[in-house]
Image (cartoon, grey):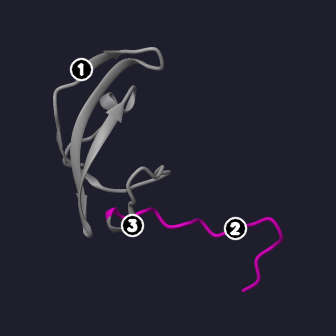
């Protein structure tokens, strides 16, 4: 099958086993196991809610920092 010019196959979602320290993550599909209580942060670069969380996929476990609207959108266990 030949792709037309300008079309690209979607890249697969990252897995926890592929994460590297201090490297941005564009997309990560996982199950959120727990959200810890949110806190309000006020700094020169960000003001708003932040929460810690932990999640897993079939390759491992990871700790997360959840910011802004993602705090409300996170679906624990879903």
Q: Secondary structure at mark 2?
A: loop
Residue drawn at (43%, 62%), measured in percent from left and top?
14
Is 59 on the left or on the right of 14, as rendered?
Answer: left
Residue bounds of the magenta highlight: 1-16
Q: Which image quarter: residue 19?
A: bottom left
Is 13 on the left or on the right of 75, as rendered?
Answer: right
Mark 2 and 3 residues: CB-CB less than 8 Å, in contact?
Answer: no
3D distance between C-alphas at marks 2 and 3: 22 Å
Which mark is on residue 76? none
Above/below status of 14 relative to 34: below
Above/below status of 16 relative to 53: below
Return the disc, 1 or 2, that comes first in the chain's sequence.
2
Q: Which residue is mark 2?
A: 8
Tell me the crowding category of disc 1: few under 14, some 14 to 19, or many 20 or more residues within 10 angstroms, Cα based: few
Is 61 on the left or on the right of 67, as rendered?
Answer: left
Q: Which image quarter: residue 2?
A: bottom right
Q: Position of residue 49 (x, y in %)?
A: 32, 21
Magenta region includes residue 6? yes
Q: Which image quarter: residue 65?
A: top left
Return the disc, 2 or 3, that comes first in the chain's sequence.
2
Tell me the crowding category of disc 2: few under 14, some 14 to 19, or many 20 or more residues within 10 angstroms, Cα based: few
3D distance between C-alphas at marks 3 and 1: 29 Å
Q: Which residue is mark 1?
A: 39
Farthest-out residue, right? 5
Q: Position of residue 31 (x, y in %)?
A: 25, 53
């Amino acid at each position: 099958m030949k792709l037309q010019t300008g079309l690209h196959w979607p890249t697969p979602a990252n897995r926890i086993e592929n994460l590297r320290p201090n490297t941005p993550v564009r997309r990560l599909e996982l199950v959120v196991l727990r959200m810890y209580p949110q806190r309000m942060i006020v700094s020169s670069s960000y003001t708003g809610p932040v929460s810690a969380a932990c999640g897993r996929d079939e390759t491992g476990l990871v700790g997360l920092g959840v910011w802004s609207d993602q705090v409300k959108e996170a679906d624990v266990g879903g």
